[in-house]
Image (spheres, helix red, strand yellow):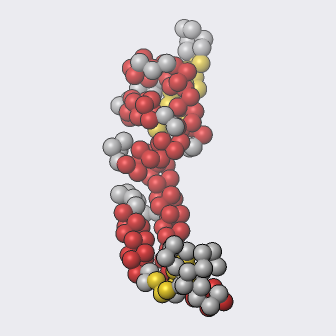
Amino acid sequence: MLSDPNVQEILMDITDDEKHSFPIIECILKGKTNDLEIAEETEIKLNTVRKVLYKLYDAGIATYKKSNDPETHKFIYSWKFDQDKVNDIIIEKYDKFSEEIDKSIEYEEENMFFACNSNHRYKFEEATENNFTCPKCGDSLEFQDNSAIITELLRKKDERMPLKRSTGK
């Protein structure tokens, strides 16, 4: 799971701490749930472990149960990592990205563009209003074939499709 680039990206966005977050999550996935055990197992300072865990908690990816140690009377926090929530975040992020790409594709398909040598780009309506002269640099505006842009947008959309897309959501 942690080797998935989509998961890594989400965790980095949440924790801003790749160096510590991955070992902490691996530790939880291996069955160490107590923050003290995690700190001991990973050799990461307890405050850092807690900081990462609370960031995961705030994002809804980790949950905890608080109990009282009968010997020391200190609170013990037992943590759980929610892999399904990570998948949900990946799908939500993909859906938002996909929607933005779809809008860009639609914009490119529905418009005819003209550009100057300096790559200032205008829709047909803007180009005609300016007599096919670039208002920024004064060069003439020539038709620009945007099929390569559309192809690139489609490629980016396919490239970013999450691996766990078929979760039924």
Name the residue rendered at 52%, 24% in the picture: 48
Q: Position of residue 66 (x, y in %)?
A: 58, 26
**Residue name at image x 60 percent, y 40 percent:** 58
Quarter of the rendering occupied by the N terminus: top left
* 123 or 34: nearer the viewer: 123
Residue 3 seen: yes
- Residue drawn at 41 percent across, 47 percent down: 7
Residue 60 occupies which quadrant of the picture?
Answer: top right
Residue 165 appears in the rendering: no
x and y percentages locating residue 68 in the rendered image: 58, 18
* Residue 72 higher or lower than 119, as above or below: above
Residue 154, horizontal then vertical, whole percent? 40, 72
Q: Nearer the viewer, residue 121 or 20?
A: 121
| Residue at point 59%, 85% (across, down) | 133
The answer to whether 91 appears left or right of 30 in the picture is right
Q: Is residue 88 above or below residue 35?
A: below
